């Protein structure tokens, strides 16, 4: 079962961190999203500031058709793209967590009420991906 935060949707899953990354990547693909970027937060923090951190990845997910539609309506919406997806091992309980940004919250930053339905459609696709895990 997923839970909502102030700006996203997340859920704990009964998979290892590595399995969860594979499964969310596959579930996103089924919804038309590809992964444009992958930031290994644990490795980056170790390399840049010699700090240990839990396993944590930020995936930049993009559905090209939806991105084109959004950019065609609001050229500066690229500041809010791609959709961030996170996977991490919870540092306190060791459970694996998957989270996705809430596009409905993101689109509020534009002040464009005409994009609310579009954002709702994107949110449904991301929600379907996280629910599929």
Image (spheres, helix red, strand yellow):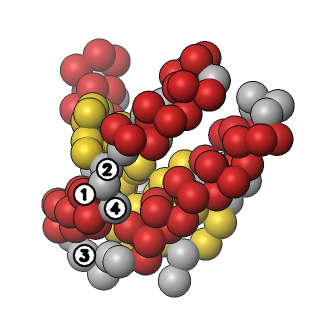
Name the mark on residue 33.
2
* Secondary structure at numbered mark 4: loop
Q: Which circle's residue, 4 or 3, is located before the other in the chain?
A: 3
Q: Nearer the viewer, mark 2 or mark 3?
A: 2
Image position, residue 6 (x, y; %)? 72, 53
- CB atoms at circles 2 and 4 under 8 Å apart? yes
* Secondary structure at numbered mark 3: loop
Q: Nearer the viewer, mark 1 or mark 3?
A: 1
Q: Which circle's residue, 1 or 3, is located before the other in the chain?
A: 3
Whole-number angstrom distance, CA of label 1 to CA of label 2: 5 Å
* Secondary structure at numbered mark 2: loop
Whole-number angstrom distance, CA of label 1 to CA of label 3: 19 Å
- CB atoms at circles 1 and 2 under 8 Å apart? yes
The residue pinned by badge 4 equals: 31
Relative horizontal placement of residue 87, taking residue 44 as reference (left or right): right
Name the mark on residue 15.
3
Image position, residue 40 (x, y; %)? 26, 36
Mark 4 surroundings within 10 Å by alpha-carbon count, few (fewer than 14), some (14 through 19), many (20 or more): some
Which quadrant holds residue 4? bottom right
Q: Nearer the viewer, residue 16 or 113?
A: 113
Please name the residue shown 54% across and 65% down the image: 124
Whole-number angstrom distance, CA of label 1 to CA of label 4: 5 Å
Q: Nearer the viewer, mark 4 or mark 3?
A: 4
């Amino acid at each position: 079962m997923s839970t909502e935060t102030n700006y996203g949707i997340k859920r704990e899953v009964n998979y290892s961190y590595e399995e969860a990354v594979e499964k969310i990547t596959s579930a996103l693909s089924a919804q038309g999203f590809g992964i444009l970027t992958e930031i290994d937060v644990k490795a980056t923090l170790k390399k840049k500031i010699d700090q240990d951190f839990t396993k944590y990845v930020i995936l930049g997910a993009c559905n090209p058709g939806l991105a084109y539609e959004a950019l065609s309506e609001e050229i500066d919406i690229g500041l809010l793209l791609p959709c961030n997806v996170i996977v991490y091992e919870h540092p306190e309980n060791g459970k694996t967590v998957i989270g996705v940004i809430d596009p409905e919250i993101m689109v509020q930053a534009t002040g464009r009420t005409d994009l609310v339905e579009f954002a709702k459609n994107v949110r449904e696709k991301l929600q379907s991906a996280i629910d599929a895990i």
